[in-house]
Amino acid sequence: MNQGKRVAIILVILLMVGLLWTYFNCAPFRSCPWSRSVTDKSAKKVTLTFYGARDSKENWEKVIAKFKAYEKANRNLDVNVEYKQLDSDNYEYLIYDSLVNKKGPNIFMMFNSWLPKYQQRIVEMPSGIMTVDQFEKNFVPVAKTDLVSDGKIYSLPLYIDTPALYYNKDMLFNAGLTKTPENWDQFVDAVETLTQLDKDGKIIRSGAALGGSKYVNRSQDVLMLMVMQNNTMSKDTRGNLVSFRTDEASRAVKLYTGFADSSNRYYSWDYDNQIYSIDAFVEGKAAMSVNYSYDLANIDKKTGGNLNYGVAMMPQKYKDSKTNYANYWTPVVAKGADCTKEEGVTASCELLSWDFVSFAAMPDNARIYLESTNRPAAQLDLIQEQMGEDGSKLAPFAEQALTAKSWSNPNNEKTDEVLQDMIESIITTDKEDKKDVSTAMKLAIDQIKELN
């Protein structure tokens, strides 16, 4: 082979190598001048921060990963949503401090009664995502009450939780009870039947772990549920201080605290020998207990899945006017929070955050979240799916979301303490601290009024 042919072959080889090198962006160096236009088209990086109190990082990881892939495919953005679970005992303090001092987060989980308190610090939904009419057609009624104000939508909830009736199947069957109580009269009768007393009148087994304050799981919620049912909310769509002042409210408080009154036929809560209500249920010391859906995992863990129990819908005051008590956390977008954006990203941090919130609420994505958390849905179509799952303990919670209502209670933690103290003052056996229902309610109303 002569010298000329060798040179030609070498030139061809070099040309082919150069073309391949250019095609693959000069890997591994990615520094070729002619490849910069390709590099500039790579996905721009964005980091959003997301805080919550109840959900774990694992609960969100699938939705976040799916959002990341969606944004990369549709907007050529590499969006990383960093979820952090904060200490639930200090959650609101940490959130408030972050918002006031402009330290983020971009997204945080807001309690369903907080909108009046945080409305000026969060961003309403941008136009073009969903109208209020569409919101009403897709979500349960309580969501509009809690999250829509002045025609503006502030969140798209993924779930709605409510208290439901947990019951020990064996205990009910052994007592000849084939159905769970549907109203409070039936409930009182069932409690009387199921409660076992010794010869001295001490409780051996409680028909229902109800009537106490701090030792009853979410006692204040159960009490307010009974008050709201008795009032049937009048012309209002949610509970408030006015509804707490009625004669019907007083009767509800008397009924609830009556479970701790040894002179009542439905006495089932021993003030002097208190055990936490969930533990009483788990240990077979109570036949019934009122709990949220998030307590399912706790009870199954404590019993190793060996307790033969079911979940039924809460007893109601009025069959044709059902009222259940809403309790849930929902994602909102913080106003003015900075995020990390690579140069060239034009979308605002607030708009990118709303992209995530609206993406998470899409039915397929909400379903992923609900399966991870085992919670009842907030969207009507997903509720229908959960209600149709035979034998599912989640089905009663899903159905109750349809008739859930909220109490106007922006300072919920402090109000919880007031209501627990009110219950305590009525049922205590200490004569000096004991108050009648009317006096205790008046004091509680005054204290709550100061908070709000």
Image: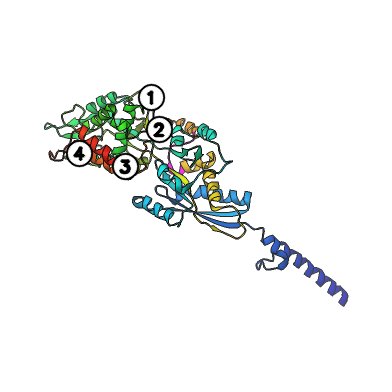
Which amino acid type corresponds to the residue marked 4 in the rendered image?
Ser
Q: Mark 1 — residue?
A: 321
Which amino acid type corresponds to the residue marked 3 in the rendered image?
Thr
Splitting the image into 4 quarters, where does residue 163 fall? top left
How packed mark 4 is, by other alpha carbons closer than 10 Å (few <14, some 14-19, many 20 or more), is many
Pinpoint residue 10: horizontal percent, then vertical percent. Answer: 81, 72
Q: Mark 4 — residue?
A: 425
In 3D space, how far apart are the residues under numbered discs 3 and 4 (Cα atoms)?
33 Å
Mark before the other along the chain sequence, 1 or 3: 3
Of badges 4 and 2, the one in the foreground is: 4
In 3D space, how far apart are the residues under numbered discs 2 and 1 (Cα atoms)?
11 Å
Pinpoint residue 122: horizontal percent, then vertical percent. Answer: 47, 47
Q: Mark 3 — residue?
A: 303
In 3D space, how far apart are the residues under numbered discs 1 and 3 (Cα atoms)?
36 Å
Residue located at (32% from left, 32% from top)? 242
Circle 4 SS class: helix
Pinpoint residue 249: horizontal percent, then vertical percent. Answer: 28, 29
In 3D space, how far apart are the residues under numbered discs 4 and 2 (Cα atoms)?
29 Å
Circle 2 SS class: strand
The stretch drawn in magenta includes residue 373: yes
Q: In the image shown, does 285 or 106 lie closer to the viewer?
A: 106
Splitting the image into 4 quarters, where does residue 328 fall? top left
Secondary structure predominantly adopted by residues drawn in magenta: loop
Magenta range: 371-379
Mark before the other along the chain sequence, 1 or 4: 1
Which amino acid type corresponds to the residue marked 2 in the rendered image?
Ala
Pinpoint residue 241: horizontal percent, then vertical percent. Answer: 32, 35
